[in-house]
Image (cartoon, coloured by chain):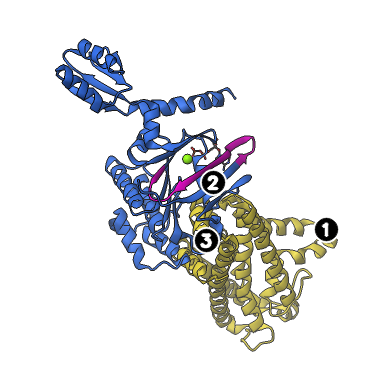
Chain colours: A yellow, B blue
């Protein structure tokens, strides 16, 4: 199975729609801008912080605060890469050109993963460096601070994995608004609901939620975490498993259904 | 007539959507070198059949092959089969050129071919504009460009003249004819018999998903019993002469005659022999439309009853 022609076709489709390019730019802007704001606020707060609070402070995670918002933008990109084909009807043109449907899905996933990884890592590193320079008067991190490089790298990767998860939802639902709703529900609404449960419950469930997984991924240490969570690497694996499961579900339906 | 053998074979195709049987045990074959019309009223299952031909919809039973294999097994399908689907099937935010380039890339078709087909369908002036702003006719031309992109031997066009202006309709007819003359397999659907009468060499007629007729156009016309409208100052005398010659002549309120069972040429000869002046001698296509209506009527009535 030669995927290259399909990948180059999907790559051309991906970058030739202005809204995709804008949304990727918005993602970077949210990461960097909100991360810088969060760091600025922390710097103002710093002189009043007690020693205990300072010991738990994670300057890396603080500089990646904007990711919380960027996750929504990246989810929209993941949804649109496939749902826009259904809303416009171009899915039929696509599948007529490439009847091996899994090749189409896999090519889209490759294009989405590669481009959101580049955007994610760029956002992550830029947010980190800007954030640390703002935090200079506190206790900033460098890339050689234990856990810092890992957190910055996994932060970027988390966006790419979330994009794949969103694409999986959209492949199953074939509907832009529906898929975005499901994605946002999983990201935020579920988080609110589970947080409201008694802590004996929420402690057990929270760590499985994508938002908590990504928080763990972009932390250089977990000393200050509000909830028990998986370690950053385990969190990465769990999130990747979700993305793969959603894509497999989507692929299974794509093969069975009429286009 | 040119005939290069059977290329498309549909065998016992069945497609159900819930309670609707859109395609009902449909079998037919399509030959190369001729235009095969696929005719049926709206909702008779033409688009569904064409989607099954290119592997978009899965048949509930039966199969359809192109050059002996299912569409899904063709390595670079756009280079062998070009399909124009019913609905506009492109992203509104993408330009015609990028849409075609992406399609070309997927089937390893040279990029130069993209500009060729854009030129061919007359979209050069808008090729870099977003497709969302295209008119129905421009969208249709872009669909045709996509179908011709891989220079395919087989073309499947679903209602290609929809949304086109008269000039565009004429252009599509000539395109279909010339593709067939080059020996390609041309399969084109329409719900208008009059359209088929102008382009098709062969027609497959369906109604409510079932095969009603599969015949050469000439046979269809003969079966339909074409009528000829004749105007003559001595209409009654001409009518008598024509009836003697075996025709049925019916006097219309406007003084003309509608003649059936005898062609225009034969009518002219009868008139000349009798020394009758003719003011008009016009074969009528409407009768073919009527034959088509009659053929599908019982199915439509059945449809309304359920
Ligand atoms: N995706 C679908 N879901 C449900 N019903 C469908 C679908 N596609 C077609 N149909 C039904 O199948 C029948 C045939 O439709 P179609 O193939 O579009 O006919 P035509 O192209 O001849 O107008 C119609 O009754 C239509 O409503
Ligand atoms: Mg149709």
The answer to whether residue B123 is seen in the rendering is no
Labels 3 and 2 touching (C-beta < 8 A) = no
Q: Residues within 10 Å of mark 1 (few under 14, many from 20)?
A: few
Taking the image as shown, residue B30 lies to the left or right of residue A129, namely left
Q: Earlier in the sequence, mark 3 or mark 2?
A: 2
Query: Which residue is located at x 34 percent, y 67 percent?
Result: B112
Query: Which residue is located at x 29 percent, y 54 percent?
Result: B122
Query: Which one is in front, A127 or A248?
Result: A248
Question: Over which residues does the magenta segment extend?
Answer: B15-36
- The residue carrying mark 2 is B10
Q: Chain of mark 2?
A: B
Labels 2 and 1 touching (C-beta < 8 A) = no
- The residue carrying mark 1 is A198
Q: How many marks?
A: 3
Position of residue B149 measured from the top left corner of the image (x, y, whole percent):
39, 59
Whether the magenta-drawn stretch holds residue B230 is answered as no
Whether the magenta-drawn stretch holds residue B19 is answered as yes
Res. A115 mark: none
Taking the image as shown, residue B142 lies to the left or right of residue A186, namely left
Res. B74 mark: 3
Position of residue B165 measured from the top left corner of the image (x, y, whole percent):
30, 41
Query: Which residue is located at x 56 percent, y 55 percent?
Result: B70
Q: Residues within 10 Å of mark 3 (few under 14, many from 20)?
A: some
Work out which quarter of the rendered image holds the N terminus of chain B and state it. Answer: top left
The quadrant in which residue A113 appears is bottom right
């Amino acid at each position: 199975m030669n995927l290259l022609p399909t990948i180059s076709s999907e790559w051309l489709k991906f970058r030739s729609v202005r809204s995709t390019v804008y949304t990727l730019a918005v993602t970077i802007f949210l990461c960097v801008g909100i991360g810088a704001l969060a760091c600025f606020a922390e710097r103002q707060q710093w002189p009043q912080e007690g020693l205990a609070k300072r010991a738990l402070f994670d300057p890396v995670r603080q500089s990646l605060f904007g990711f919380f918002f960027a996750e929504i933008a990246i989810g929209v990109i993941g949804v649109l890469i496939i749902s826009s084909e259904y809303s416009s009807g171009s899915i039929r043109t696509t599948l007529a050109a490439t009847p091996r449907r899994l090749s189409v899905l896999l090519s889209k996933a490759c294009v989405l993963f590669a481009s959101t990884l580049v955007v994610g890592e760029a956002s992550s590193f830029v947010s980190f460096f800007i954030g640390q320079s703002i935090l200079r008067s506190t206790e900033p991190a460098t890339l050689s601070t234990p856990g810092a490089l890992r957190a910055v790298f996994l932060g970027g990767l988390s966006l790419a994995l979330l994009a794949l998860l969103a694409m999986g939802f959209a492949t199953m639902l074939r509907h832009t608004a529906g898929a975005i709703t499901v994605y946002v529900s999983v990201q935020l609404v579920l988080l609110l609901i589970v947080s409201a449960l008694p802590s004996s419950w929420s402690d057990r469930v929270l760590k499985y939620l994508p938002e908590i997984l990504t928080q763990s991924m972009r932390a250089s240490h977990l000393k200050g975490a509000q909830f028990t969570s998986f370690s950053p690497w385990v969190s990465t694996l769990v999130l990747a498993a979700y993305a793969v499961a959603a894509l497999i579900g989507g692929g299974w339906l794509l093969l069975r259904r009429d286009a | 007539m040119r005939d290069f053998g059977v290329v498309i074979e549909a065998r016992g195709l069945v497609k159900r959507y819930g309670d609707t049987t859109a395609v009902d045990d449909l079998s037919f074959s399509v030959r190369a070198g001729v235009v095969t019309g696929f005719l049926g009223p709206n909702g008779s299952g033409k688009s569904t059949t064409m989607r099954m031909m290119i592997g978009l919809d899965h048949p509930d039973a039966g199969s359809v092959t192109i050059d002996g294999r299912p569409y899904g097994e063709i390595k670079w399908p756009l280079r062998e089969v070009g399909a124009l689907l019913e609905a506009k099937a492109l992203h509104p935010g993408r330009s015609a050129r990028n849409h075609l380039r992406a399609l070309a890339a997927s089937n390893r078709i040279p990029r130069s071919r993209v500009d060729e087909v854009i030129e061919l369908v007359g979209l050069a002036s808008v090729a870099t504009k977003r497709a969302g702003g295209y008119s129905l006719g421009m969208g249709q031309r872009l669909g045709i460009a996509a179908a011709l992109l891989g220079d395919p031997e087989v073309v499947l066009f679903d209602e290609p003249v929809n949304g086109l202006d008269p000039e565009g309709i004429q252009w599509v007819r000539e395109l279909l004819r010339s593709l067939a003359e080059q020996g390609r397999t041309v399969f084109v659907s329409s719900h208008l018999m009059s359209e088929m009468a102008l382009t098709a060499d062969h027609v497959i007629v369906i109604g409510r998903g079932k095969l009603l007729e599969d015949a050469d156009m000439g046979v269809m016309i003969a079966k339909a019993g074409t009528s000829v409208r004749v105007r003559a100052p001595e209409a009654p005398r001409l009518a008598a002469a024509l009836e003697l010659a075996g025709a049925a002549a019916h006097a219309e309120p406007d003084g003309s005659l509608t003649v059936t069972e005898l062609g225009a040429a034969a009518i002219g000869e009868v008139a000349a022999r009798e020394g009758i002046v003719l003011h008009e001698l016009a074969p009528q296509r409407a009768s073919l439309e009527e034959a088509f209506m009659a053929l599908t009527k019982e199915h439509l009535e059945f449809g309304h009853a359920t």
